[in-house]
Amino acid sequence: MKTFFDSSAFAERYIEEPGSETVNTLCATATELALSIVCIPEIISALNRRLRERSLTARQYKAAKESLSEDLRDALIVNLTPDVISACTGILDASPVRAMGALHVACVLQWGAELFVSADERQVSAAEKAGLQTKLL
């Protein structure tokens, strides 16, 4: 199944949370995996925040970044194009979702994912409104 993860969901591969096992299972069963280009800096930001808060050690941070780099080799990265920005504007007009959430949903639409995975309820709602099959973590 062509599966697209937003940052909130994909980060659970590197930060142990209740949905981590589900994310790992979905990654293992995906026939194709895609992420938005904004996913990468969002995950690095989340890891850095946890490092600053000392809920992640320097060693854990380094290991998480290395794992992310390895995972990116097998993922398609959806870039921000004029079509994605146009779709994002429509999503923002139609749903009470934040800008980054709308960008993720627009990237999903552009790529043609069969499943969109997120831990953000508003984002999932916007994706469903746009006709996408979703999985809320």
Image: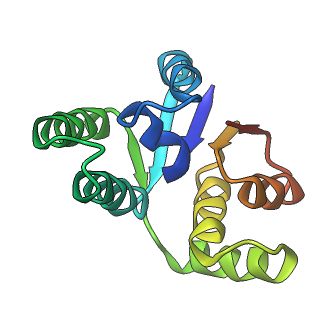
Give residue 75's position: percent from left, percent from top: 38, 38
Give residue 2's position: percent from left, percent from top: 60, 33
Q: Quadrant of the C terminus?
A: top right
User: Looking at the image, which is closer to me, 18 or 12?
Assistant: 18
Q: Residue furthest front?
A: 54
Give residue 11's position: percent from left, percent from top: 43, 43
Identify the image quadrant of residue 84. bottom right
Q: Relative to residue 73, is residue 123 drawn left or right?
A: right
Instruction: Work out whether 135 lies above or below 99.
Output: above
User: Looking at the image, which is closer to me, 62 or 101?
Assistant: 62
Q: Residue at the location (39% across, 37% down)? A: 15
Identify the image quadrant of residue 104. bottom right
Q: How is the image coloured?
A: rainbow
Q: Quadrant of the N terminus?
A: top right
Q: Residue at the location (80% across, 61% down)? A: 126
User: Looking at the image, which is closer to me, 15 or 91?
Assistant: 15
Give residue 72's position: percent from left, percent from top: 30, 40
Instruction: Work out whether 113 lies above or below 88.
Output: above
Q: Relative to residue 136, is residue 71 drawn left or right?
A: left
Q: Relative to residue 70, is residue 122 drawn left or right?
A: right
Q: Residue at the location (48% across, 21% down)? A: 24
Label total for image: 0
